[in-house]
Image: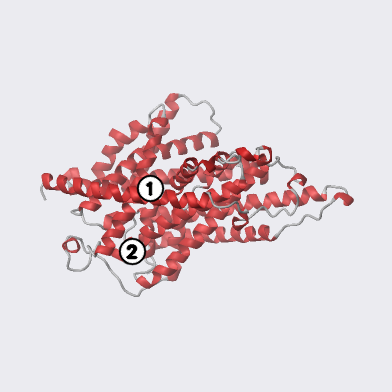
Amino acid sequence: MNIDSLRTRVTYIAMRMRTAVRIACLAAAASSAVALHAPRASPASLGRLSTAAPRSSLPLAPNPSAAVPRGDALRLKGGADANTLVFSLFKAIVGSGVLCLSGGMAAFTNSRAMLLPSFALAFVSMILSAYSYYSVGATCAATGATTYKEAWSATVGPSTAWVPSLAIVSQTAVATICYAIIIGDVLRDVAIAFGATGALANRDVLLPSIAALVILPLCMLRDFGLLAYTSMFGVAGVLYCTLFMLYRHFSGSYSRGTELFRSLSAAQRPSFGSSTTPLKALILVAMFNTAYMAHYDAPKFLAMVGNRLTEFAKLTKAGFFGAFLISALIMASGFLTFGGSSMGLILNNYAAGDTLALLARVGMLASIVFGFPLVFSGFRTGALSLLDIKAPSQATLDTIAVATVSVAVGVALKMSDLGFAASFSGALLGSAIIYIFPAMMHVALAKKAVEADQQLKPKKRKGVALGNEAYMNYGIMALGVALAGIGASVSYLQSFTDILN
């Protein structure tokens, strides 16, 4: 295919897909509006703090919503603002991690019959993640905390507040490595699609080059606010990938005997059978931890809805359900197209000559390159806070940028398996941030209520005791510990040994 004909096809397909993306965005906005403008309901479906005592009996901050006049109850009621908040939460949850879910399925099965159980795992993971996200917000509302670290300090204790901070900083560090892996893979495929050969199509040359010429200068910007709008690229890229992957599956473009099928290498070609290894399903579960992780942003979104838990519950349900839909569609369409051959980055399965795949790669490349500095900014801010460096010099900031980009690129050159990076970090760090830490804060807050009641004079005590939800959170803690230990072990054994094969 020459360059002129490629440009003509790209222009035509872009016009058609732009219309489809607009329709998808309108549908998402409509569903969000329905979720948020529904009649007010108790957030009990996502859980309440099981203190069993009136809030006034707790030695905690007063409920901020009580001071807000009902007529000023919700910016969300305006419609546009409601959709903006849901869209913002959706952006915070959904990222490039969804592109490894098909590979997560392929890690434990090549059977189409496992699609429904995988959907079930995706849904249960979403419910648990949404509950713990809401739980973090509820803890912040009860204690007056404005950050994840403050919520931990107010409940579990300030002496160990470095623990969740370290986990979050580590997770953002892993995210920079994942971004570098994706950039290297996608940039190579884009270069090959445009006819590059030799060093110009070599991942080991392309990744350090774009890191030095583009990524590092962006990470050394004085003001990252200039890049804030680029997060829209990521959402548009994910929506386009969803539509593109669904189209390729239902059109049978990669069925045996087609031109695209013949252009694939043996490792890329679809492979289906009846093989299933249930233990390896933990790899997929760990990837869901990465796909549904946004919990350190819960305090920020709680503040955006005026610290109103009812509205925060609506926002949580709408955002996480939207993330579930996109995650399930991408996982299913990729797996149903390539089966057991689905790779850690599903875009790697599609042919270099697939024009629709080229558009997906270019879009994702732009979103990841411009998104890298934002992820780096989160890492740098968390690291400086963890080290208690309050006024770093510009030289210090630039040194951190050089070191972070160098390490991320160095690791990505040695380890190109996005699936392992997503599953291992999701098991170890995701389980802590999503399950263990929020459950610990919930139980600690419930215990404070019990202690406060016991300190009252006998006649004034209200018999506060740990409720069912507190015991449920003990179970969530245990689940998180099990997923962290077993999931991380399975991910490592699957990637670096033959023990599970």
Q: x%, y% of residue 335?
A: 33, 64
Q: x%, y% of residue 129?
A: 53, 55
Q: Which residue is drawn at 24% across and 47% down?
A: 14
Q: In which quarter of the image is residue 249?
A: bottom left
Q: Which amino acid does label 2 sit on?
A: Phe
Q: Residue at x 46, y 61 (%)?
A: 122
The quarter of the rendered structure image containing the C terminus is: bottom left
Q: Residue at x 59, y 46 (%)?
A: 137
Q: What residue type is labelled 1?
A: Cys
Camera-nearest residue between 329 and 440: 329
- Which dot marks residue 178? 1
For marks 2 and 1 on the same chain, the one whose residue lies earlier in the sequence? 1
Camera-nearest residue between 32 and 285: 32
Q: How crowded is mark 2: few (under 14 residues within 10 Å), some or many (20 or more)?
A: many
Q: x%, y% of residue 150?
A: 62, 40
The answer to whether residue 47 is above or below residue 140 is below
Q: Do the residues labelled 2 and 1 touch (CB within 8 Å)?
A: no
The answer to whether residue 44 is above or below residue 81 is below
- In the rendered structure, the answer to whether residue 474 lies left or right of residue 291 reads right
Residue identifier under label 2: 335
Q: x%, y% of residue 319?
A: 48, 50
Q: In which quarter of the image is residue 349?
A: bottom left
Q: Residue at x 36, y 58 (%)?
A: 330
The answer to whether residue 343 is above or below residue 95 is below
| Label 1 residue SS | helix
